[in-house]
Image (spheres, rainbow, N blue to C red):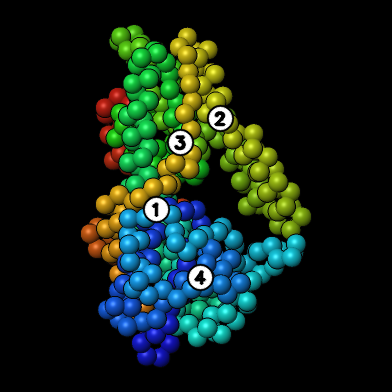
């Protein structure tokens, strides 16, 4: 940080909303204001408010009573700081943010968010700003941290949903496919599927075949089970779709010119659109392969909503308090990671642009196989 103890700090929440965001704002704010004597301002609506310099002063009164509230009192957005649409034109707004930062006399900036937020923070750090991030996402896919706040609450919500579909699946002798959030990584589906006793769990990291899933269900039927519950990550793909998706991604990476990159991204978006309703397609395929009726339940945004569970409140509070310590010590350019029961300052350069996938040999995967859960492979 700058010379001396930082006195004026900005904070914002960015990316998708998540249980625990308010707990993190409170955790950092109370430690920064009450323990270290700092001044805190909260930027409205994430990167958008930072660019437009819209903020409010946060004091003890503003932070009171928000620990248990879902969402974020500051609002959020998914804007990319280097590629924002302003007056119909895509512009790099990093210089504007630097100007606002200096105009407001900020000594530091706390960005609470996921992988995209880490990349935004890295760009601002490279521009000379003193930034720290806190890891938030229900997907638990942020590289460099054991877990992220929002994940535990979303796991509870998805698990309860899987619990509840068991009874209707049993009553009607059906296959119930429950689609859980997770475009890139399957942590949430795997955790909720294990905790909810799903008979099949399908995640992006393990491409499935319809025949493998159908065989798991037919084996259950042969043993006398009249229903099956399938937990499906929204980013799960069968073997053929995975090959198409990976080929489209390679085209994006290989593109050398702006025109080629635009064409490659358009093709990738087309592939993703074609695969968007894969859970409904899988339901139809399983009906044909097993003779059982199949129904789909999509949990969607309900997984993001509501009060954070105790585990997320605790995690967000201790990460927020740890961030205040780093600010007070003059440290910047880090993500405050959860490490065991403690924390660790992970350099943003090691975090930004990386994704934490479920390893094929992870203990949860091994446990699923040992208890007889089908993984579609």
The image shows residue 120 at horizontal and vertical percentages of: 54, 66
Say which mark, if any, is on residue 70: 1
Q: Measured along the vertical axis of the image, is residue 352 above or below residue 152? A: below
Distance, label 3 to label 2, CA atoms, is: 15 Å
Q: Secondary structure at mark 4?
A: strand
Q: Secondary structure at mark 3?
A: loop
Distance, label 2 to label 4, CA atoms, is: 38 Å
Task: Identify the residue at horizontal 47%, vertical 67% (top origin).
Answer: 12
The image shows residue 307 at horizontal and vertical percentages of: 35, 50
Say which of marks 2 and 4 sits in front: 4
- Residue closest to the far left: 341
Q: Earlier in the sequence, mark 2 or mark 4?
A: 4
Residue 333 appearing in the image = no
Say which of marks 3 and 2 sits in front: 3
- Residue closest to the far front: 61
The image shows residue 181 at horizontal and vertical percentages of: 46, 41
Which of 188/355 is in front?
188
Q: Earlier in the sequence, mark 3 or mark 1?
A: 1
Which residue is the site of mark 4? 43
Residue 241 appearing in the image = yes
The image shows residue 138 at horizontal and vertical percentages of: 41, 49
Which of 361/274 is in front?
274
Distance, label 1 to label 4, CA atoms, is: 18 Å
Asked if labels 4 and 3 touch by Cβ distance under 8 angstroms, the answer is no
Which residue is the site of mark 2? 278
Count residues near mark 4 (Cα–Cα under 10 Å), then give few for <14, some for 14-19, many for 20+: many
Which residue is the site of mark 3? 299
């Amino acid at each position: 940080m700058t010379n001396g103890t930082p006195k004026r700090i900005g904070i914002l929440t960015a990316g998708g909303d998540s249980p625990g965001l308010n707990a993190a704002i409170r955790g950092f704010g109370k430690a920064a204001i009450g323990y270290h004597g700092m001044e805190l301002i909260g930027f409205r609506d994430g990167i958008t408010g930072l660019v437009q310099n819209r903020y409010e002063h946060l004091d003890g009164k503003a932070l009171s009573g928000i620990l248990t509230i879902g969402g974020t009192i500051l609002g959020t957005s998914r804007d990319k700081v280097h590629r924002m649409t302003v007056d119909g034109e895509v512009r790099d707004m990093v210089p504007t943010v630097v100007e606002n930062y200096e105009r407001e006399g900020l000594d530091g900036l706390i960005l609470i968010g996921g992988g995209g937020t880490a990349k935004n923070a890295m760009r601002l750090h490279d521009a000379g700003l003193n930034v720290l991030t806190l890891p938030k996402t229900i997907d638990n896919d942020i590289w460099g941290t054991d877990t992220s706040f929002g994940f535990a609450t979303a796991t509870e919500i998805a698990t309860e949903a899987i619990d509840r579909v068991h009874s209707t699946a049993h009553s009607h002798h059906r296959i119930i496919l429950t689609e859980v959030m997770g475009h890139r990584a399957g942590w949430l589906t795997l955790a909720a599927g294990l905790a909810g006793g799903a008979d099949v769990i399908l995640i992006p990291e393990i491409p499935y075949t319809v025949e493998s899933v159908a065989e798991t269900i037919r084996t259950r039927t042969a043993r006398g089970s009249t229903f099956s519950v399938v937990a499906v990550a929204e980013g799960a793909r069968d073997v053929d779709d995975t090959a198409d998706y990976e080929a489209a991604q390679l085209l994006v990476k290989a593109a050398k010119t702006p025109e080629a990159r635009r064409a490659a991204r358009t093709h990738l978006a087309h592939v993703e659109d074609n695969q968007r309703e894969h859970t409904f397609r899988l339901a139809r395929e399983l009906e044909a392969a097993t003779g059982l009726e199949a129904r789909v339940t999509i949990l969607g945004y309900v997984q993001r909503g509501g009060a954070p569970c105790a585990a997320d409140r605790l995690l967000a509070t201790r990460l927020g308090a740890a961030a205040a310590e780093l600010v007070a010590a003059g440290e910047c350019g880090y993500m405050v990671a959860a490490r065991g029961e403690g924390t660790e300052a992970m350099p943003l350069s090691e975090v930004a642009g990386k994704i934490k996938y479920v390893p094929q040999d992870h203990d949860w995967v091994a446990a699923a196989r040992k208890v007889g859960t089908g993984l579609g492979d």
